[in-house]
């Protein structure tokens, strides 16, 4: 587990972030985001934003390590409802910040956070290509939903100006009880037919990403942090994961199946994460990568790995 200090900008931005989150929670009742197979999974901001500070902290821990002094163009791939993208506009007020998401509903919601230097548009990280080179690319808790996402790194680096920055964060907790129990219960014969083929997030360790981007000529800072979130209230771990990683599974179930599944899953999580006098501890490992492109590059443009099958990206997923 690592500990990193917070800058003054980080502390101020987190306060602003919380104000934006509270506003979003009052305004939006639900979003829909396309999932594999053509079905629609409903995103509920009330559920997702229940732990706004805990979910937002990795974003600020990531972007605090991006040492871009005065970028002109910044892109947030998988921006979701836009509240974190708006914080980038506060950090770099002279830059033009563009938030991109593949969900029309998310982009529509993000317009609430648009400003003179922050705009949002519909797009897909797997095919995104800027009209001009950019200074900073940020992607927060998005790439884990894209199979073969390592094949995109070459194109991302080619989209950066010399001296530009690529920063992303992905969850690394897919072997934890919260996910293992979800997969086991989803494979139960009562639910297996309904949950077959739903989205399954996956990511790699920091050393793998470090090697990938170092091989592309970048100077790379890669690390892993396990946050110990202390949660309160009824079934807090279930509330946490039902707004993110478990949502595709829950949405795939019928109205008759879902209450049964939720009751059993919540009971399994209570046993796996016992309540203590101060709350329920949810260890959450995350993988961070900040890559700095050299001022000049000898290699020519690189293409994404043609073998990588990459569906549209979705923001706000962890």
Image (tube, rainbow, N blue to C red):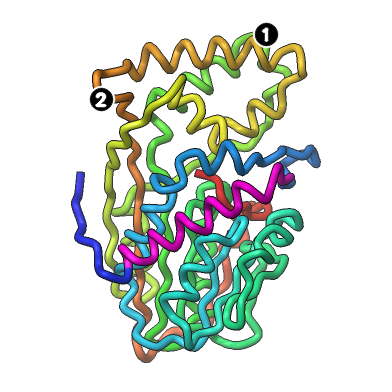
Secondary structure under tag 1 reads: loop
Please give the name of the residue rendered at 47% of the width and 11% of the height, measured from the top-left corner. Answer: 267
Label 1 and label 2: CA atoms lie apart by: 36 Å
Q: Which percent across, then down, holds residue 223?
A: 27, 55
Stretch in magenta: 10-32
Q: Residue furthest bottom?
A: 296
Front-lying residue, 14 or 247: 14
Residue 98 in view in this figure: yes
Tally the numbered discs: 2
Q: In x, y percent, where is residue 295?
A: 35, 90
Camera sees residue 147: no
Q: Image point 57% across, 72% down: which residue?
A: 303
In depth, the one of 153 and 133 nearer the eye is 133
Q: Which x, y percent locates residue 265?
A: 52, 15
Report which quarter residue 244 is drawn in: top right
By secondary structure, the bulk of the magenta-drawn segment is best described as: helix
Estimate how packed mark 2 is, as few (under 14), some (14 to 19) or many (20 or more) residues with alpha carbons within 10 Å.
few
For residue 78, above or below residue 238: below
Residue 155, relative to residue 194: is it above or below?
below
Task: Give x and y (percent) for residue 109.
Answer: 69, 58
* Quadrant of the snapshot with the N terminus: top left
Helix, strand, or loop for circle 2?
loop
Q: Residue 278 carries which label?
A: 2
Residue drawn 57% across the image and 36% down it: 47
* Residue under numbered circle 1: 190
- In the image shown, does 106 or 288 lie closer to the viewer? 106
């Amino acid at each position: 587990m690592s500990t990193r200090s917070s800058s003054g900008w980080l502390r101020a931005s987190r306060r602003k972030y919380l104000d934006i989150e509270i506003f979003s929670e009052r305004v939006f009742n639900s979003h829909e985001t396309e999932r594999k197979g053509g079905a629609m999974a409903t995103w509920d901001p009330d559920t997702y934003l229940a732990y706004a500070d805990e979910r937002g902290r990795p974003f600020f821990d990531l972007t605090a390590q991006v040492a871009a002094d005065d970028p002109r163009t910044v892109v947030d791939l998988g921006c979701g409802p836009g509240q974190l993208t708006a914080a980038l506009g506060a950090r770099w007020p002279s830059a033009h910040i563009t938030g991109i998401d593949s969900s029309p509903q998310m982009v529509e919601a993000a317009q609430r956070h648009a400003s003179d230097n922050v705009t949002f548009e519909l797009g897909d990280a797997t095919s995104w290509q800027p009209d001009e080179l950019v200074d900073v690319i940020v992607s927060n808790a998005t790439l884990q939903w894209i199979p073969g996402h390592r094949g995109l790194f070459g194109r991302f680096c080619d989209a950066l100006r010399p001296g530009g920055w690529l920063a992303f964060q992905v969850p690394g907790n897919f072997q934890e009880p919260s996910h293992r129990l979800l997969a086991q219960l989803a494979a139960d014969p009562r639910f297996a037919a309904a949950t077959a083929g739903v989205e399954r997030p996956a990511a790699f360790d920091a050393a793998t990403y470090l090697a990938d981007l170092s091989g592309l000529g970048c100077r790379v800072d890669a690390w892993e942090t396990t946050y110990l979130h202390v949660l309160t209230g009824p079934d807090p771990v279930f509330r946490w994961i039902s707004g993110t990683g478990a949502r595709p599974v829950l949405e795939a179930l019928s109205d008759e199946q879902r209450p049964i599944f939720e009751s059993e899953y919540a009971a399994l999580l209570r046993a796996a994460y016992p309540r203590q006098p101060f709350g329920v501890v949810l260890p959450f490992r995350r993988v961070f990568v900040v890559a700095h492109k050299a001022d000049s590059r000898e290699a020519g443009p690189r293409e994404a790995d043609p073998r990588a099958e990459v569906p549209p990206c979705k923001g706000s997923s962890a």
